[in-house]
Every structure is written in structure tokens, then in C-alpha cells.
Amino acid sequence: MLPAFVRRAATLVATAVVASMAVFWLLSVVPGDPAQVALGLNASPDALAAQRAAMGLDQPLVLRYLDWIGGLFRGDFGVSVVSKLPVGPEILDKVQVTLTLVFCALVVALVIALPVGILSAIRARSADGVVVSAASQVGMSVPGFLVGMLLVTVFSVRLGWFPAGGWVAPSDNFLEFLRHVTLPALALGAVQAAVLTRYVRSAVLEILREDFIRTARSKGLRPLQALVVHGLRNAAVPVLTVTGVQLAAMLVGAVVIERVFVINGLGSMLLDRVGSRDMVAVQGIVMVLVLLVLVINTLVDVLYTAIDPRLRTRVSQ
Amino acid sequence: MTRTHRRATTLAVAVITATLALSACAGSAPNDSSTNTLTVALQASPLNLDYTTSAGAAIPQALLYNVYEPLVKLDDAGEIIDLLAVSHTVSDDRLTYSFTLQPDVTFSNGTPLTADSVKFSLDRLKTDWTTASAAQLSSISSVDVVSDTEVTITLSAPDNTFLYNLAGPAGTIFSPDAVSDLAGTAVGTGPYEVESYATASSLELVANTDYWGGTPGLDAITINYFADTNAQSNALLSGDADAIVGLSSPQLLTQFGGDDRFAITEGTTNGEVVLSMNNARAPFSDVRVRQAVRYAIDNQAVLDTVQQGYGTLIGSMVPPTDPWYTDLTADFAYDPDRARELLAEAGQTSLDVSFAIPNQPPIVAAAQVVQSQLAEVGITATITTLEFPSVWLDQVFTRADYDLSLVNHVEPRDIVQFSTPGYYFGYSNPDADAILAAAISGTNEQFVQGMTDYARLISDDAAAEFLYLLPQLNIAVSGVTGLTENSTSQSIDLTGVTRTN
């Protein structure tokens, strides 16, 4: 087991390093002068030159990269030229918000998709199965920000049940946290629920055709019983794969949802800092997102083997 | 009906009943009115708290007058009034300004305000400021402490813009022992103190209980920032905010009209929406082509389409709150035939030009109207939208690589930029520069007359086309009074705000 783990960790680090180079290079060719944005209209050429030097923009690209990546390995993300605060603690602060939101959205997606997907598979040929299938198709094609705006219009502006935006940390006031997280989690989770429903449905449909389900049915179990006792674990592998991909999609989707709901998380910070060309912060945020996605994928890999013993032998070969 | 269907129907009825019951009692009333606090929803957010080294209108908007105070300030009508100065006098040669300071003023960290604080702060303009507003006070040659409460400022040359600029961010008086972390800590003499700032999200101000001017009108002010204007107006509609100052999308006003929970005011700003033409290169180096553009644009139609009619036609780069404002809207009134004639005279009957604009929704909308009006007279303008501020600043403002652009010039009294060498307008006219220089160093009467002449010359030369002046649209829940209707200064002045409920 140890070599497999070491190999996986090495892959993760190597991918992260390559990604860091790509991120750094891409951001260096984005048009717009960070010094000009920091000093604004009418700044004198001398002030601009001094600002560029202070930002290290007069250094060669490779040196700047080595400086940055060296800092990252020491846990130092650098100091923002915009907020003049260390970037690391700022990101740590915001990433908690975004991860909490994404986790709640995942719960929403699973709570909707698992029962709906399973039921629509069992009742595939009846009318409600078709309705669910059609509804999930529609749900997939609606952008999350639109869902968000509709939710705000109905539940905040018209009905006044939930706040239109903002964020309260669960540790500060759990009830207020729930009030604030409900709509954004729904907006972010609903679209993913639609996607996930289809995968759950097709995975379950496939399982229902398997011999062992027929055997279970012939022993007298009803379809749902047969599925719960024998089938779900088998359906879990493809569903888990999609959930992993969706987690990554929700991290990215949170960028837009946070803007709609005025949540001060990693996504809002990313948009703001791209706008103000705060490259130190942007690089840091993108790297954190890359690392999160890599870690999620690795975890999904590990979970496969936990769920399906057949994969365990394949891994150790 | 089967049993499951019956159960589903019962459930649906229960849910609908509960929904109706909840919506009946929830109500969407604005914030509870028991406390003497105000929550303001603004759009652009400060990068940090330091306007001495960081650009952006949002920092002085939040902090000037509310937290930081200069010797003088601009009131709602644009008049200069004393603030930290009890009084001031100007010498006959207009080179020496003597200020007597308010007694018993302390900074929010307890340090008393003295003439030394004034000297310290104004001396820092040359040594520590990096933003451009410092240059507005570059005519100061020395600051001399006469006594603890008296200070004299000497100018290198007479400067009619001096007091006005002293009322802006550059005139801020800092506490000498509190400038080590201006980005994170703001120590001023104003009626409110900064409690905390969550970057791009929320600024908490609390009343300065030792304020020299008496007890502030509110116990606390929260400024929440909304990058998206829909979210901003939703915050007010859902009761999460009490006021919006400077709504940028007039389309959203309809949601508040006819609702007696809200009061709407329309005032003026310093924001001229300017269709800039690159005077430095063909085809707009030809005055006839520039004049043709001015005749080709129907400003009222642009204002109606983009701003729902909110805003003011100005015809020059001067808002009505400036002393030298003259209504020049009749000078280049919409006349497409005259435009075609001028283009024919210039030998430019079919023109292709680049139109590089910022990616801000109202600007994009205005550019499309302008584009179609230009097409009417035979000018094909190809629109490129550039990310604002970063890419627009780089391409248009710094490198002047454009034919036409369209941007909101928010700085006060920025008409003088037509005489700034290398400015992206590319306008160069020694006569105009001479008129401006004489105005700035002349008597007050010569100043107003000179600026009037300057504005007219810029307009006649068609150095740019001035589409309209942006409106200052404020919406507040009823019971909030004292919001300044006009935006004359660089501050969103909340010092006079009180609540009656």
C-alpha cells in the first residue's frame, strides 16, 4: 500500500508544480499594468516606475516565479499590493466561507439527486419517471446565477424570508448562518442536483438489469428493497466519480454565486483582485483552487478502493 | 385516486398553506428602527484605507469628512466652508493663507490637533504621497507654524484652485503618531471612527464620542459594498440596507418608485460622460471631423436610452455646480446634415474608426447608441470593449492607442486636463493653455471669467463630445434625513445624517 500512496502523493505534487508554472505564466501575459491600476489616473511616470519596482515587476519572470514558489513552499503567499495585507491569512479566511458554501450546496445536490434519481430509475417507465428526467434536463441548462437571482427576487425581495445576500459564519450565529446560506446553497446545488440526478438514474437503471438484482427479486424482494440491500454500493462508484467532478465545478461555480449573493469568499476575492490586477493574490487564490481540486480527485480515488474491493487488486498490481 | 396520490395532494396543500401563512406574517419591512444606526449600500469598494498611496474614488468617498477632516470642506452646493479652521484669511498678493484652528480638537487616538499636525500632514504630500491628488497642492511652497492654533501656508504662485483642492483628500490632516499603517488604520478628527474594514465587503464606522463638533447624528454606520447593482438594490428592497447613495443604474429606480417606504432624490455629480476623440492623430486631428461628431450626436436620445432621462445635458466639461458653468448645449445641437457637410469639407465622407470603451454596462449601452448615430453620417465606429480599469488604462489612457473612447470622468474640475501635456485626449492648443494659466493665477473674478472662456474654447474646438452629466441618485428608507443630494466633493458626506424613526 505504501508505494501506491507515495506514487499518488508524488503525482499530486508534480501536477501542482506544473499548474503553478502555468498559472504564473498566464497571469504574467494578462494585459494591464498593475502599477497603473494601483496608482490610478493621472499618476506621474516617476511614481509609476517606483511602484513597479516596489511590486518587483522590473525583475525577470523566472526570478519572480522562483521567489513566489519558494514562498509558497514556506507557506508564505506574499503581501497584497492592493489591501497591503499578507495574502495567506486572507485566503485562509475566505476559503472557509467558500468551502462551507460548497459543502452545503453538495448536501443540497445529494439530498435532491439521490432519492429523485433512484425513484425515477425504479419508475422509469411511468409518467413521473419521465417528468423527473425532463425536469433534470431543464435544470441542467439553467445557469446557477439565474437560479440565484430568481431565488432572491422571490424569497428575499417579495417574501422577505431570507436575506438577499451576505454571510454569517456558523460559529458566530448558527441560525443566522442557516438563513444566509440557504439561498446560495440552493442556487449552487440545484444545477448540480439536476446533473447528478441523471447519473444516479442511469447508474441505478444499469444495476437493476444485473443478474444479482433479478436473483434478489426472485427471492421475493420488492425493487426498492433489492436495490437498497444489494445494488446501491455498486451504483456508488460512477456516482462518486461524478460527485468528485461536480465538487470541482461547484468551487468554480461559487465564484459567480458569491457575487450574486454578495458573499465575501474566495470567488468574490478572485474577481475583485483580477479587476485590480493584484497578481500576488490572484496567483495565491488560483493555486489554492488547483490544490483543492487535486486533493478532491485524490480523495475520490482513495474512496473508490474503499467502496469497491475489485479496484483494490487493480491498484496494487 | 390511489393512496400515494392522495398523500401527495395533502402534502401539497399543506405546503401551500404554510407558504401563504408565512408570507403573510413575514413582511419585507426595512431594518428595525429601534436603533440609531444606518446601513448604506454602495457599489465601488476601497482597496484599503489609505488614499495617500492607493488610487480609487471609493477610499475618499468613505473616509473624507466622515473620518478624516481637512482645514476646509465643500458643502452640498459646492461652496468652500471652514472645517478644522475656525477662519482663514488670504493676503493681498494671494500667496499667503493664514488659518486659525478649531480649539480642543483631538484625533480619535487621543492626540490633540495642533498647527504641527497641519504642517506634518501637508509636508507629507511631497514625501510620502504617491497618488495623483497630491499634485493638486503642488503650489504649496511652505507651511509655517505660527502658534499652536495658527498656521500659515505660502504658495509659490497665486493658485485659485488651492482652497478647493485643500478641501479634497490631499488636504487631510493626519495625526503625526498614526501614519505607520494608514492602509489598515485610519485615525482622523472626524465625527466617525473606523471600527473595522473587511476588504471589498463591509466598513464599520462608530460615532466619535469626543467629536469637537458635538455628538454625531448616528451611533454607528455600516457601509456594505455591492459589486453588482442588482444585489445593491435588492439589499434595500429586502431591508438589509437603509440607503443607497449614488445608484448607477437608473433602470432599477422603478422598483422603488411609488413605494412610500422609500424617498428618492436626484442631484448632480462631477461625473461627465465624455466621448473622447484622439486629437493627436488622423482623422480626429482635423477640427472639422471633430465638430462633425459633435453635430452627429443626439445627446438627449443617448440620455433617454441609457439613463432613462436621469442626468443633465451639459455641452461642455463643466457641471452646473462649478462657478464658471455656462449652458453650451445649444452650440452643437443635433444636426446630422451639418455633420455630413463638415465631413465632406474635410474630405472624409466614409470613415472607419476604432471605438475602444470600458466594459461597464452603462458605457457599453451608450456606445451602441453613439455608434448608430455616427453611422447615420457615414462614420463607421468599430467597438472594442476593454476591461476597466486595467486594460482600458493601459491601452487608451496611457498609450493613447484609440480613435474614439467613451468614459466617465469623475474627478472634480477635471476640464483642466485638456491642458495636461501627454493626456490621452491628445489636445494641444497654446491659446487654451495661456487662458487657463492666467485664470488660475488671476484674481477671483479673472478666475471665473477665464475658466468660462476656457470651457467655451474647448467646446468650440470640439476637443471632445460631452454626452451628459451623471445624476446623483440616492434612495433612502423614510426617516433618514441629511444625505447630501449633490455629489460636489470627493466624499460621500454622511456627517449630517440622522434618523427620526
Image (cartoon, coloured by chain):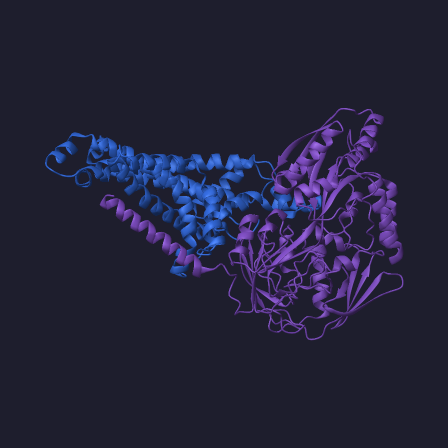
Chain colours: A blue, B purple
Please, which residue is most extreme toward the front here? B1
Q: Can residue B260 be seen in this view?
A: yes
B314 or B490: which is nearer to us? B314
Quarter of the image with the C terminus of chain B in it: bottom right
- Horizontal arrangement in the rendering, residue B326 relative to residue B384 (left or right): right
| As drawn, B28 above or below B397 | below
x, y (%) of residue B237?
53, 55
Please, which residue is most extreme toward the left here? A219
Q: Is residue B389 visible?
A: no
| As drawn, B123 above or below A21 | below
Q: Residue at x 60, y 63 (%)?
A: B478
Quarter of the image with the N terminus of chain B in it: top left
A221 or A18: which is nearer to us? A221
For the image, the number of numbered tags is 0
x, y (%) of residue B225?
56, 53
x, y (%) of residue B335?
80, 35
A273 or B26: which is nearer to us? B26
- Horizontal arrangement in the rendering, residue B53 relative to residue A27 (left or right): right
x, y (%) of residue B264?
64, 57
Please, which residue is most extreme toward the bottom here? B104
- Horizontal arrangement in the rendering, residue A286 relative to residue B417 (left or right): left
